[in-house]
Amino acid sequence: MVRSAHPLFLTISAFFIALESGCAEGTDAPQNPSTSASSSSSSSSGTGGGGGAGGGGEVVPEPDGPPVLTIVNGVNDHEAIRLCFVPYPDGGDPAPYPADPSGLAFAAASRVDPASLLPADKDVYLHVIAGDLTKTKDLGCATLTEGNAPADVVVAPVAVIPASAFVAKRSLLLVPTGCVGGPGHTDPLEKEACGPTYSADTPNPGLLAAAMSRVTAEGKLSLQAAHAAQPMPSVDVRLVPGTEGGMPQQVAPSLTAGAVGPFPPFRQLARFEWGSIAQAEILTFVPGQLVKTSASPLDAALLRGGLTQADFEDGRAFTLVAVGAQPGIAPGAFWHALTWTVVRSDP
């Protein structure tokens, strides 16, 4: 089935702000591509995660680097997805990504060379493909997105992304979010699983799109967090080291839905100060309080991002990406619990 949700139009000016600041704020209500920049901007120049945690108000320039793209699957009501980056507005028939019809698993990460995936100098209209992905084998995006998708395949239009986003000298993070719907995707806890605007009749596909900071510090780990779990309220993101009596470290305070922060990144501890990665945890708290709402093992989050404990080393930058349901909600009939994935900020 093809969902008729209006796509979010990510304007060039909005992306410029997001790529410069390392922060973007998404929306649960995608808008029509013709919407003006003043009403459709999905990004913000705020830190979205408390810039003070990164460097106490210090002014740190974001270094230029080659354009790179990291994709994390944050669609919470299917086991895997494929993506169609359709040239906009002219259309076309690119192959879905990834090429493997089994798709990109929930909370999995993939590094992509934008030049190998996307048409040059073209805006693209992002669609999420879900459901029975075996039926998408050998099908192009034109067939899938123009109303001819096979039965049991869900196609959800998400966002028009400007070509400038993929050539900027930044490390871009794209996380499709929310729930795209499907047969039986309704439950009394559906809003806690998918987001406050979700219903079976009105799915809420969304997109977190922002630059991850390449700022590092010698002898320290550089950390940011990305809030790509639509149902989760604003949270303090803290890491507790795997050391005896280790105290939670405030990595990203008051992180809001759709945001990446802080900027500059948190760079206060060396790798040895984090102790045993197998014992370290990612925690969420009610902002400014001691009320813990979730705890997730750091080592599992590294594995989801294709990283080993040895990769987590001083002088490197990483982003902790939150996807899934509201903290405290167990996996359900069609959704996943809150899940963290760690990716390289400069892959």
Image (tube, rainbow, N blue to C red):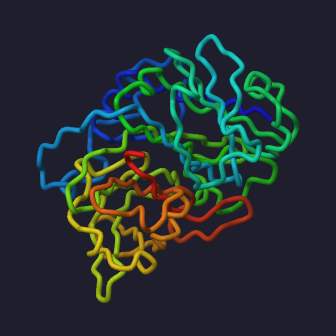
Q: Residue furthest bottom?
A: 244
Residue at 58 percent across and 55 percent down: it is 107
Quadrant location of the N terminus? Answer: top right
Q: Is residue 298 above or below residue 244?
A: above
Q: Residue 156: where, in percent of width, then height?
A: 68, 35
Residue at 39 percent across and 75 percent down: it is 292
Q: Is residue 306 left or right of residue 311?
A: right
Question: Number of labelled discs?
Answer: 0
Residue at 55 percent across and 50 percent down: it is 109
Q: Residue 152: where, in percent of width, then height?
A: 85, 42
Q: Is residue 147 above or below residue 155?
A: above
Q: Is residue 101 left or right of residue 257?
A: right
Q: Is residue 293 left or right of residue 28?
A: left
Which quarter of the picture shows residue 319?
A: bottom left
Which quarter of the picture shows residue 244?
A: bottom left
Q: Residue furthest top?
A: 90
Q: Is residue 40 above or below residue 246?
A: above
Q: Residue furthest front?
A: 310
Q: Residue 23: where, in percent of width, then height?
A: 33, 42
Residue at 69 percent across and 50 percent down: it is 80
Q: Residue 255: where, in percent of width, then height?
A: 35, 55
Along the line of sight, which residue is nearer the eye, 169 or 37?
A: 169
Along the line of sight, which residue is nearer the eye, 340 or 31?
A: 340
